[in-house]
Amino acid sequence: MIFRLLPFLLYLAIFTSCTAQQGKSPKGESSPYTLKTPSPNGTGKYYMGREISYVMGHLAADWLERPEREQEENVSQAIENMGIQSNERIADIGAGSGYYTFRMARKVPQGKVFAVDLQLEMLDIMKQRIEREDIENVELIRGSETSPKLEVNSVDLVTMVDVYHELSHPRETMQNIVSALRPGGRFVLLEYRMEDSTVPIKRLHKMSEEQAVREMESVGLRLRENMGNLPWQHFMVFVKE
């Protein structure tokens, strides 16, 4: 009987250990995260009542570049919504294959786009395009799970497109993003609308405006507006308090 229980006991020991580690930050402060049994497509890690989803891997790069994406998401309108100025410095967090990165780069001939991603494979995809097309105003950065590795007061605009819900450490990442924003800078968050059941995306890959506002306010960002002119996504513009 004890041998049958060993796998369960091993799982319980690991789960308990992880929970203990999550319960305290390195400084001994209470962690904003809790661990529970994962739901389908979920990590089992919760932040402010929201379960964090699994990260989309580099093998899904083709889906990011699908021809029908413009029609489904009206990407051109989303970029127009950003009000990009030609000399701005922009950070695209979770840039992936660079679908947004390179479109935004064309809007800033006197500026720069920092394409931040964790996955070396995604960075390599973008590097190949930069070299192939001789693009000079895109800089690649490999971020970490807690930081986009941006300098303090270095960017005018930070964008995150269908990425935030996958961040394993949203509190730390957003604190670093807020530090990177220049005075008057803005954070643009695009997420599939949780409130709309017709949006054909899995639930854990959606967010409600209410949840997004709650999480952004915890790091000192205020919702300036949520532009409702995209087919599937919230387009939320946040500014520093």
Image (cartoon, helix red, strand yellow):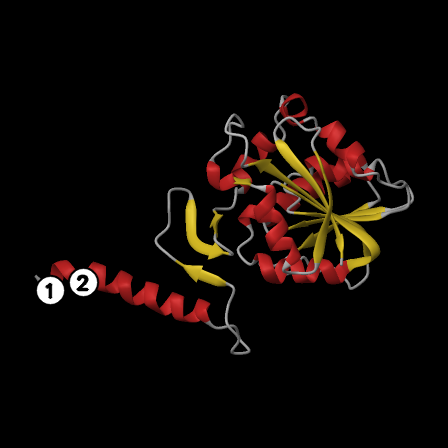
Q: Is residue 146 visible?
A: no
| Residue that lies at the very extreme toward the left in this rendered image | 1
Type of amino acid under label 1: Ile
Q: Is residue 231 positioned above or below 95 on the image?
A: above
Check whether the beta carbons of the residues at disc 1 and disc 2 lie within 8 A of each other.
Answer: yes
Residue 51 location (% of width, % of height):
46, 50
Helix, strand or loop at label 1? It is: helix
Q: Residue 162 in the image: state x and y as whole percent.
A: 60, 40
- The relative height of residue 137 versus residue 34 in the rendered view (above or below) is above
Residue at horizontal 61 percent and vertical 42 percent from the top: 209
Task: Determine which of the numbered discs, if any, sits on residue 203 in the image.
Answer: none
Q: Quadrant of residue 207?
A: top right
Residue placed under numbered mark 1 in the picture: 2
* Residue to which mark 2 is pinned: 6
Residue drawn at (74%, 40%), measured in percent from left and top?
101
Residue 46 visible in this rendered orientation of the protein: yes
